[in-house]
Image (cartoon, helix red, strand yellow):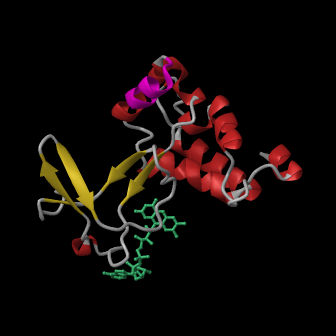
Amino acid sequence: MRRHVRAKTLLNEQRKITDMVLRELGDVGYWGLLVDREYGGSAAPFISFARFLRQMATVDPTVAGLAWCMACIGAGRSRASVRIACAESGTTCQSWPAVSVLSAFALTEPCAGSDLTALKTEAKLEGDHYVVNGEKLFITNAIAGRTIGLVCLIDKKPPC
Ligand SMILES: Cc1cc2nc3c(=O)[nH]c(=O)nc-3n(C[C@H](O)[C@H](O)[C@H](O)COP(=O)(O)OP(=O)(O)OC[C@H]3O[C@@H](n4cnc5c(N)ncnc54)[C@H](O)[C@@H]3O)c2cc1C
């Protein structure tokens, strides 16, 4: 990370972290720090993870935030997401942290932050799939093609 900051290769033209940096972080296991060893992660204790991210935040706060989001509110710790990541990358689960598959957790809406009863985004079952309509904002790691845990109404009922 320091090397990229010095070389100014951290961000692309849209001022986003480059895919190369995300991939390199994956290659050294950054996205799998809290993941169990049986799934190829480091199984780091949370306190070590938090200390490490604090250190990372002094180099680049965005990259620290991405890992926090992925590991703590994204799908980074779920077995399902690990399987999805393995399937998508064509690797075995043992090498999952080498793959940069990031995930997001989409809860906040323009009028629903702390007050979740104000959620308006709705999923409707149509045939064998859900059609989702609504608007989310402030969603870290939300890029097309990634795994996103979505909080929304289903057939007008709030999530339980
Ligand atoms: C960098 C960043 C990344 C984010 N990433 C994500 C993400 O990945 N996914 C996602 O879903 N959201 C994300 N968010 C959104 C964040 O979680 C929301 O900002 C948060 O839920 C608060 O909602 P709000 O901003 O609408 O504030 P509001 O809900 O309007 O709250 C404003 C203030 O009022 C206080 N308040 C609210 N209700 C009460 C109450 N009943 N009693 C006392 N005080 C109250 C709050 O503590 C706050 O200080 C992100 C935000 C930031 C800044």
Relative vertical location of residue 115 with respect to residue 46 in this rendering, above or below? below
Q: Residue at 11% across / 43% down in the picture?
A: 127
The quarter of the rendering in which ligand 1 is drawn is bottom left
Q: Nearer the viewer, residue 60 or 24?
A: 24
Q: Main secondary structure of the magenta part?
A: helix
Relative vertical location of residue 90 with respect to residue 26 in this rendering, above or below? above
Query: Is 88 included in the stretch rendered in magenta?
Result: yes
**Left or right for 73, reference 130:** right
Query: Is 140 included in the stretch rendered in magenta?
Result: no
Q: Residue at 29% across / 75% down in the picture?
A: 115
**Left or right for 47, reference 14:** left
Quarter of the image where the C terminus is located = bottom left
Q: Give the range drawn in magenta.
A: 83-91
In the rendered image, the residue lying farthest to the bottom is 111
In percent of width and height, residue 139 lies at: 46, 61
Q: Nearer the viewer, residue 34 or 74?
A: 74
In percent of width and height, residue 100 lies at: 57, 36
In percent of width and height, residue 47 lies at: 56, 46
In percent of width and height, residue 45 lies at: 53, 38
Quarter of the image where the N terminus is located = top right
Q: Nearer the viewer, residue 71 or 142?
A: 142
Relative vertical location of residue 9 with respect to residue 84 in this rendering, above or below? below
**Left or right for 156, reference 27:** left
Q: Residue at 45% across / 20% down in the picture?
A: 38
The total of numbered circles placed on residues is 0
Q: Residue at 52% across / 26% down in the picture?
A: 96
Relative vertical location of residue 122 with respect to residue 89 in this rendering, above or below? below
